[in-house]
Image: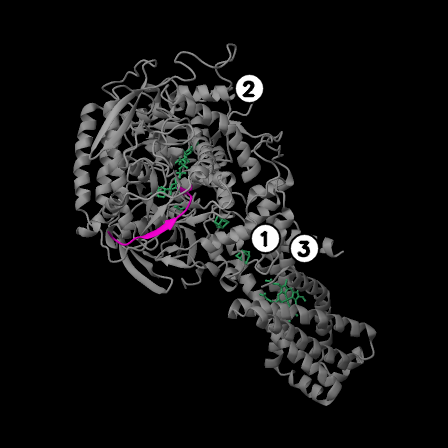
């Protein structure tokens, strides 16, 4: 076995997004004195992950007619009856506590109405003005405030430590610890802990166009898959309709142009500079994310596309001055990359945004592996087939906090650290060192191939033949990856090695997405099968569960348990209006 | 050129001017004190010195010092205005601009008075 | 290497000096016209309580102000820290003060 | 896609804390290319051992800042065209922070100072209390709001020569955070904030060089925030001593 360092702690948290940081704070509050808490993250604490990139805001029912029940019903309807209802309920219920915690204890600075109360607006799919925000940079506010709270507490920091393997005990019933690469030195470090929270935030960056931050490459789900944990809803990839399209050679491509542009009356134009969304939906540009994404995608497939192969968004008819004032940040961002959003045309394309699928957990974030917890975008269930705008950050902060509390409690009964299964440890070490034995070659080209395959065959619209073709391609890409080497003369902060590892995780999960998409023979929320356009009856809703045993992957279907509300019913009182939003 | 590109803007130049003038004044001050104290011990040498200062080159240097003092004073007042007066930043830039203008005028005036 | 006390001292002395130095410059511009001599200076200043206080205040203020100023520059430019820096500050202040007061006595007594 | 055949000539700093120097690379010029894209291209196509840091790629995370032609900038939002000199570009690690490798710096000192400035909220309420009403037009709130969108990219920190000369100096970003919190009427310990910024590395060391405000990519004004702290601490100084 190659050399590695050892380290012990009590509570180990992977990731510093909303889930990871909240877990650290809550663990610190709930664990007995003297408990060692360690935060390990692939980037710098608070400076990576997607919570920081949240623009629109945070969904929470805070009265004024809105209720937790209404938020819950919107979440279930939005998720097309696939959500785990207990998780969705807890999300909506605890969001109320979490937002108070964010304002009152963490010190967030959310926008106010002139009477001093929190300002709330409505995202698509919501029946109340519910989204709390700080301008259009809500995530920065939330993460900066959380980050400074965490940094000012005695929490051990392992920055630029990439988790590469979950190491169970020999009997496989519990987790012993996590294997890391200390990226700065390139050394391996095995950290044992009594409890481990995985909050690495999914991130569908295997698509040609994607919004999440560069550090998110599905490492967490790939690790969970390798230890045999069940993953649910893996076919559910949410596309945001308007990602910036600036050419293939810039990282700006794929980044989000905010939803509000369409909401405010922005027009989508095809290559001929004609509006087209009304051909697809009566709501035109204001239709929901999935519908607009499919509209744009269809137009692109018909070759009615713009210069770089997307469509245009046009705001100028609203008056360039107004656009400049109302969307200051967006206009500046476009200008920085050479586009005039206020007066000109900006090319856009649907872009992979959020991953609804994740590890099967209970509402306390526990998994079937003792000592292993999952929260945030890595956990499946809360959103079902579609996540409402504003429910993502609510989910990660709510369940991160829950995980912190639960780990703080559970750790009291765990008297000792567990010994690892050395054969798994050894296998994981071999896995990450595999490319050193091969001849170095360019990984980027392979990543481009992967992104093209996923975009073309496992993307916005899917068919059986397409998915099968995709699956074959993936096999091919995987075997190519195994032949690509990385020079091992200097492993310190070796990004190319990490590119290789990123590819490995992305390939593994791409496979699962493809298989799960094949297994779901209907169209729900984010998952659209052209060969099965029907949604199927809601009463017989099932979700997919993928598991890896040995080398083989199995996808099964499980019935949704309607533990709180049945399709066709509601938990809102009879006289409640359908929507409280003035002009939806 | 590239090494200190971050310094090429007005406020930084104002800062370095203030610093250099302050240091120059601090170095000049002991000399000034020494010369004046000659009044007590050797008035004749003081006069000799004052005659010596009549030479154009020395005069220029002297005016240079007065200029430094003026620059430093106005610069210092600008800094303190910026620190203590609760103005909106725009007005502060105007104030700074005005002071700078005053500086150049007075400096020019002093130098031309030679 | 400035805490609030040194900072306040530097600002207060600067505020004291501002009118004094401006006054001084004005007098100088007036005085240098037609040349300057020891006698002329002394005739104006000697025995004058006003000029004694005027220059006295200036000297006290400038010694502190200049010393603190040089302290900052020396720290930031040469990385001098700790005791050495304190010694430096107060030596400069004392030196300037001594020389300055000597000069004030010389011209006003 | 419109591609000009031209090559850019890029000098990139290589090395670590023990030293290093510039190395020259040729990178194909493209439309819509950012400095970060250029750096990535080198790592992906020419020299796989090149190290740099980024995450969000849209100016939100503040992890991609580097010295570009001697000026600190967020590289993901800096279009190459706006900084090119002829067809040359010089890219180095941020000043004033220890270098880990090549273009990646150790940002810990920056964040340690953030914490040392009492840059974390001191709560007056708990999660069981209602959210405090705040008038968005009220003076303190407006003042606090001005500095709140800091992405802690350390561009200002590396632009500031006071930081260069005085390693204890808390620096513009941390002080701006302190000022923001000081103006947050919800904060319980505004006295502690003034104490924290009044020591030997505190706000009183700022010489109003203004490079912080000049370079802040988000057009924030740390210089003004620091002046605010100086004013508040001076006011308190007089109150206390009288
Ligand atoms: C551009 C954009 C805008 C969005 N806007 C909204 C919005 O307006 N409202 C909303 O509700 N949601 C929004 N979302 C979704 C929201 O950001 C996510 O749902 C949520 O933030 C996920 O939080 P998280 O804590 O699970 O993961 P993240 O915040 O993504 O954090 C993941 C963390 O794990 C770390 N990590 C990853 N891999 C490893 C590894 N191998 N080892 C160690 N650490 C690792 C990462 O570096 C990071 O620190 C948006 C997302 C994007 C991309
Ligand atoms: C009379 C009016 C004066 C005013 C208003 C004034 C004002 C100031 C101020 C505000 C500073 C702080 C600058 C900063 O922090 O960046 C300063 C610095 C300084 N002053 Fe003065 N000053 C005056 C006279 C003098 C004189 C006569 C001397 C000569 C001894 C002097 C020497 C210095 C020095 C050496 C510095 C340090 C410069 C630096 O920190 O960059 N000053 N002055
Ligand atoms: S103040 Fe501006 S430059 Fe400084 S860290 Fe914040 S965002 Fe960056
Ligand atoms: S650049 Fe530095 S000196 Fe002050 S005004 Fe900004 S902190
Ligand atoms: S990569 Fe996040 S600010 Fe540049």
**What is the span of residues highlighted in magenta in the rendered image?**
A1-16
Residue D226 has which mark?
1
In this rendering, does residue C91 appear at all? yes
Question: Within the displayed image, which quadrant is ligand 4 positioned in?
Answer: bottom right
Residue at the spot 34% in from the left edge and 46% down from the top edge: A162
Q: Position of residue A436 (x, y in %)?
A: 21, 52
Q: Position of residue A564 (x, y in %)?
A: 43, 17
Quadrant of the snapshot with the N terminus of chain B: bottom left
Which residue is more in the foreground, A267 or A272? Answer: A267
Which coloring applies here? one colour
Residue D50, above or below A212: below
Residue A492, above or below A175: below
Residue at the spot 73% in from the left edge and 53% down from the top edge: D239
Residues under numbered marks 3 and 1 in contact, where contact means CB atoms less than 8 Å apart: no
Q: Position of residue C89 (x, y in %)?
A: 62, 71
Does residue A317 belong to the magenta stretch? no
Q: Which residue is mark 2?
A: A65
Q: Secondary structure at mark 2?
A: loop
**Taking D213 as reference, is A464 left or right?**
left
Among the 4 quarters of the image, the one containing residue A460: top left
């Amino acid at each position: 076995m190659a050399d590695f360092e050892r380290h012990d702690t009590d509570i180990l948290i992977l990731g510093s997004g909303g889930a990871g940081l909240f877990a650290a704070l809550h663990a610190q509050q709930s664990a007995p004195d003297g408990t060692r808490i360690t935060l390990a993250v692939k980037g710098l604490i608070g400076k990576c992950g997607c919570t920081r990139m949240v623009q629109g805001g945070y969904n929470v029912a805070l009265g004024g007619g809105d209720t937790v029940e209404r938020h819950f019903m919107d979440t279930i309807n939005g998720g097309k009856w696939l959500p785990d209802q207990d998780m969705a309920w807890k999300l909506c219920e605890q969001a109320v506590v979490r937002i108070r915690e964010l304002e009152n204890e963490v010190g967030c600075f959310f926008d106010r109405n002139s009477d001093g109360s929190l300002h709330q607006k409505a995202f698509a799919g919501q029946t109340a003005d519910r989204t709390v925000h700080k301008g259009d940079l809500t995530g920065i506010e939330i993460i900066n405030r959380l980050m400074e709270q965490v940094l000012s507490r005695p929490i051990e920091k392992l920055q630029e430590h990439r988790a590469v393997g979950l190491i169970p005990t020999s009997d496989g019933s519990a987790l012993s610890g996590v294997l890391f690469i200390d990226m700065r030195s390139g050394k391996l470090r095995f950290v044992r802990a009594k409890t481990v929270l995985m909050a690495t935030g999914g991130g569908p960056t295997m698509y040609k166009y994607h919004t999440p931050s560069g550090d998110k490459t599905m490492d967490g789900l790939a690790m969970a898959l390798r230890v045999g944990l069940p993953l649910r809803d893996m076919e559910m990839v949410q596309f945001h309709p308007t990602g910036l399209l600036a050419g293939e050679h810039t990282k700006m491509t794929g980044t989000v142009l905010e939803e509000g542009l369409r909401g405010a009356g922005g027009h989508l134009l095809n290559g001929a500079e004609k509006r087209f969304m009304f051909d697809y939906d009566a709501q035109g540009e204001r239709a929901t994310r999935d519908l607009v994404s499919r509209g744009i995608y269809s137009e692109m497939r018909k070759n009615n596309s713009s210069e770089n192969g997307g469509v245009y968004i046009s705001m100028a008819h609203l008056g360039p001055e107004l656009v400049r004032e109302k969307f200051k940040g967006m206009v500046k961002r476009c200008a920085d990359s050479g586009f005039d959003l206020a007066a000109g045309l900006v090319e856009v394309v649907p872009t992979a945004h959020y991953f609804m699928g994740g590890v099967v957990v209970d509402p306390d974030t526990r998994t079937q592996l003792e000592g292993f917890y999952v929260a945030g975008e890595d956990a499946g269930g809360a959103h079902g087939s579609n996540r409402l705008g504003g429910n993502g950050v609510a989910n990660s902060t709510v369940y991160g906090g829950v995980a912190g509390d639960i780990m703080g409690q559970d750790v009291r009964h765990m008297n000792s650290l567990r010994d690892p299964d050395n054969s798994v440890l050894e296998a994981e070490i071999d896995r990450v060192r595999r490319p050193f034995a091969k001849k170095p070659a360019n990984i980027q080209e392979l990543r481009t191939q992967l992104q093209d395959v996923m975009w073309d065959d496992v993307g916005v619209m899917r068919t059986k033949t397409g998915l099968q073709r995709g699956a074959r391609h993936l096999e091919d890409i995987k075997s190519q990856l195994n032949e690509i080497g990385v020079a091992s003369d200097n492993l310190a902060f070796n990004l190319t090695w990490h590119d290789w590892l990123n590819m490995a995780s992305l390939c593994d999960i791409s496979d699962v997405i493809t298989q799960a998409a094949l297994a779901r023979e209907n169209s729900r929320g984010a998952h659209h099968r052209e060969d099965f356009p029907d949604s199927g009856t809601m009463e017989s809703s099932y979700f997919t569960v993928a598991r890896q045993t040995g080398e083989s992957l199995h996808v099964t279907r499980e019935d949704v348990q309607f533990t709180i509300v049945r399709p066709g019913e509601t938990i809102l009182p009879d006289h409640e209006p359908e929507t409280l939003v003035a002009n939806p | 050129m590239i090494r200190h590109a971050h310094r090429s803007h007005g406020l930084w130049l104002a800062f370095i001017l203030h610093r250099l003038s302050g240091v120059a004044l601090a170095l000049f001050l002991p000399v000034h004190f020494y010369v004046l104290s000659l009044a007590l011990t050797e008035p004749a040498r003081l006069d000799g010195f004052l005659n010596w200062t009549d030479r154009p080159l020395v005069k220029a240097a002297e005016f240079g010092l007065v200029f430094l003092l003026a620059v430093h004073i106005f610069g210092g007042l600008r800094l303190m205005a910026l620190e203590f007066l609760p103005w909106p930043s725009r007005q502060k830039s105007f104030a700074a601009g005005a002071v700078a203008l005053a500086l150049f005028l007075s400096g020019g005036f002093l130098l031309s008075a030679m | 290497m400035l805490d609030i006390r040194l900072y306040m001292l530097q600002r207060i002395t600067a505020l004291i000096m501002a009118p004094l130095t401006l006054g001084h410059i004005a007098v100088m511009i007036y005085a240098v016209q037609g040349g300057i001599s020891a006698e002329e200076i002394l005739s104006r200043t000697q025995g004058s309580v006003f000029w004694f206080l005027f220059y006295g205040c200036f000297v006290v203020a400038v010694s502190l102000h200049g010393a603190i100023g040089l302290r900052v520059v020396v720290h930031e430019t040469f990385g001098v820290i700790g005791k050495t820096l304190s010694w430096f500050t107060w030596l400069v202040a004392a030196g300037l003060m001594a020389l300055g007061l000597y000069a004030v006595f010389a011209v006003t007594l | 896609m419109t591609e000009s055949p031209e090559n850019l000539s890029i000098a990139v700093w290589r090395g670590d804390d023990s030293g290093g120097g510039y190395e020259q690379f040729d990178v194909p010029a493209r439309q819509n290319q950012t400095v970060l894209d250029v750096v990535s291209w080198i790592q992906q196509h020419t020299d796989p051992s090149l190290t740099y840091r980024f995450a969000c790629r849209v100016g939100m995370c503040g992890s991609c800042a580097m010295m570009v032609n001697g000026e600190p900038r967020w590289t993901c939002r800096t279009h190459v065209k706006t900084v090119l000199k002829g067809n040359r570009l010089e890219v180095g690690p941020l000043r004033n922070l220890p270098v880990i490798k090549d273009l990646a710096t150790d940002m810990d000192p920056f964040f340690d100072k953030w914490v040392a400035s009492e840059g974390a909220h001191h709560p007056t309420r708990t999660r069981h209390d209602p959210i405090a009403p705040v008038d968005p037009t009220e003076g303190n709130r407006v003042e606090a709001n001005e500095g709140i969108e800091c992405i802690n990219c350390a561009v200002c920190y590396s632009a500031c020569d006071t930081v260069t000369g005085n390693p204890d100096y808390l620096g513009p970003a941390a002080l701006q955070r302190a000022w923001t919190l000081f103006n947050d009427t919800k904060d319980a310990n505004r006295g502690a904030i003034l104490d924290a910024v009044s020591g030997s590395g505190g706000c009183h060391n700022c010489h109003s060089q203004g490079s912080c405000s000049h370079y802040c990519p988000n057009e924030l004004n740390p210089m003004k925030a620091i002046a605010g702290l100086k004013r508040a601490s001076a006011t308190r100084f007089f109150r206390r001593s009288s």
